[in-house]
Image (cartoon, coloured by chain):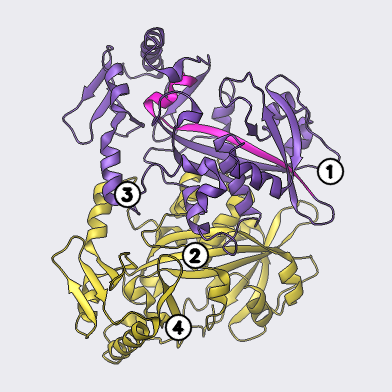
Chain colours: A purple, B yellow
Amino acid sequence: MIPELSSGFRSIVAFPLPQKDLQAYIEKVNSYYHFKVASHHSTLGFVLPFVAEVFARYPGWELNSNSTPRTLTLNAGNTELSRSALVASTLADICAQKHFAVISKWRNELKPAYGPTGEVLFSMERAAVTLLGIVSYGIHMIAYTRCAETDEPKLWISKRSKTVAVYPGLLDNCSLVREAHEEASLPADLVRANAKACGTLSYLHSRNARAGGEIGLLQPDVHFLFECELPADVEPKPFDDEVEWYQLWDIEQIKEGLRMAKFKPSFALVMLDFFVRHGVLNEGNEKDFVEICARLHRTLEFSVGGVTFAQRDSEAKI
Amino acid sequence: MIPELSSGFRSIVAFPLPQKDLQAYIEKVNSYYHFKVASHHSTLGFVLPFVAEVFARYPGWELNSNSTPRTLTLNAGNTELSRSALVASTLADICAQKHFAVISKWRNELKPAYGPTGEVLFSMERAAVTLLGIVSYGIHMIAYTRCAETDEPKLWISKRSKTVAVYPGLLDNCSLVREAHEEASLPADLVRANAKACGTLSYLHSRNARAGGEIGLLQPDVHFLFECELPADVEPKPFDDEVEWYQLWDIEQIKEGLRMAKFKPSFALVMLDFFVRHGVLNEGNEKDFVEICARLHRTLEFSVGGVTFAQRDSEAKI
């Protein structure tokens, strides 16, 4: 059922679950280098061996191939600034040498790597985050209206412009407050009044061909979810060139879109959780219901505490 | 934050998470006997060693202490009937011998043990389910109204009668349809029209003194969640002697009740998930927000597919 329902699901079930197959999990976890920052105990990400070996050619990066698990450690002083500077210079050369396809599209956007209590350990170019496998944080908002007769929700779906850096042309959600204004021309006050926090998603995404770049890079994702019920007469409209159009889709159209893999994978998962919260998916019509709910809220191997919306909102752009 | 917020949470964080401490997890998992049914591969529950040893004294139960993990296997024919009969006779004697405090309160209510595709492998006395550590399924419904001025939800809370078998006197939720009628005198049509499925909870509850019976018995729980917004003029009233009273509590009263451990543990978790879905708990006010969401949707070591509400509704009583 799960793969039929959503192509987005396939990329989050690739990594074995320890509760289901402990041996496969241990082997998988030990097949990666565990990325750490010197004098910090916790693992920040899982790195593919051929990626770790490239980083280890640069000063400030230490490879330990004799430990279990094997480790890649960033040893570049004890401040956010000193670490960020070293990561930046390393990535600049890695990019110039064209080592990895995934950073061929430089985004010029910094993303933070957080420590166990939500402190920023360093920041790095967004396109390269997945090389080190550190947690990405995102915000998703679903804007919807209710059918006056049936009370069934209909969702506003956007089509990503063919010129955006990632997942061009795929279908996506609305954005939040500032972005809702910039991208969807929605009145900011209306969105602020109606948008409600409604949970999280957390999963370990294993990047496939569709995501672009190297296959098998791991991307642990955390999304903070919001939903916003809009009056029937409010209609999001493209404001800039990141969105081609907005359309109001009913549940059947969305199910078909999921089956046909028309959605950006993370948005497919956001919609599955919407379906769960609103009773569209339930134990009566989906035999893997409990497993779907658990898969959408995976305990990650990495610290995810203390990171707040305010922190992320102050980043260049979400 | 988590333990402060809810005593119910303490009992579900006692079992280590493999993603957080793999070594502790492996040791814990291997400290139990894994309960299986002959000619079925999957593990149905984790059993404390001193419990497994008592079962192994009876015919039809096989202990293997030389494997890793150690196993307790029910070998009683290949039908639901033959297995149920053997379990019943074993439990009758175990109860008569007063081996375990947890079955001192015989419930006279059968609960099914499900196989990987939701088929019933056998049924057993409800009070004894936790001895074998098999998955318990439950249904929870939160009945709430919205404050006309602030739109903030207020929840109907029930006080369990002092005479019910488990968690007497603790605070609980409303029940679903038939129970809503029987226990809360709510019109069945109203509940049926307004009750909406809104997800699941899954967790591994480690029984403590408060639950009664032996300490450390494991209880993997799956709850199917429903919520029902009621008009302000509808008021649940006790119908039989299982409920002492119903009261409408606002969010602050509930938070205080959670801190003071006034709620039945599973209901505390049901309310946490309500808080998550309705934005009461969010990343801005709870540093462990992502972890709470993951903990409430734990991947269980046991099959949970294919079990539906209809199946459980046909059981004696939920």
Give, as a three-letter code, the residue at label 3: Pro
Give, as a three-letter code, the residue at label 1: Ala
* Label 1 packing within 10 angstroms: few (<14), some (14-19), many (20+): few
Tags 2 and 3 both on a single chain: yes
For marks 2 and 3, the one nearer the N-term is 3
Residue under circle 4? Answer: B110
Q: CA distance from mark 4 to mark 2?
A: 19 Å
Q: Nearer the viewer, residue B20 or A262?
A: A262
Q: CA distance from mark 3 to mark 1?
A: 46 Å
**Subunit bearing disc 1:** A
The answer to whether the residues at label 2 and label 1 have Cβ atoms under 8 Å apart is: no
Q: Nearer the viewer, mark 3 or mark 4?
A: 4
Please report the residue visible at 58 percent of the width from the left and 31 percent of the height from the top: A310
For the residue labelled by badge 1, is the local secondary structure a helix, a strand or a loop? loop
For the residue labelled by badge 4, is the local secondary structure a helix, a strand or a loop? strand
**Subunit bearing disc 3:** B
Q: Which mark is residue B18?
A: 3
> In the picture, residue A75 is in which quadrant?
top left
Q: Which mark is residue A232?
A: 1
Q: Is residue B242 magenta?
A: no
x and y, in percent, of residue B291 in the image:
45, 46
Please report the residue visible at 51 percent of the width from the left and 51 percent of the height from the top: A2
For marks 3 and 4, the one nearer the N-term is 3
**Subunit bearing disc 4:** B
Q: Which mark is residue B306?
A: 2
Magenta stretch? A124-146
Q: Nearer the viewer, mark 2 or mark 3?
A: 2
Q: CA distance from mark 3 to mark 4?
A: 33 Å
Give, as a three-letter code, the residue at label 2: Gly
> In the picture, residue A267 is in which quadrant?
top right
Q: CA distance from mark 2 to mark 3?
A: 25 Å
Tags 4 and 1 both on a single chain: no
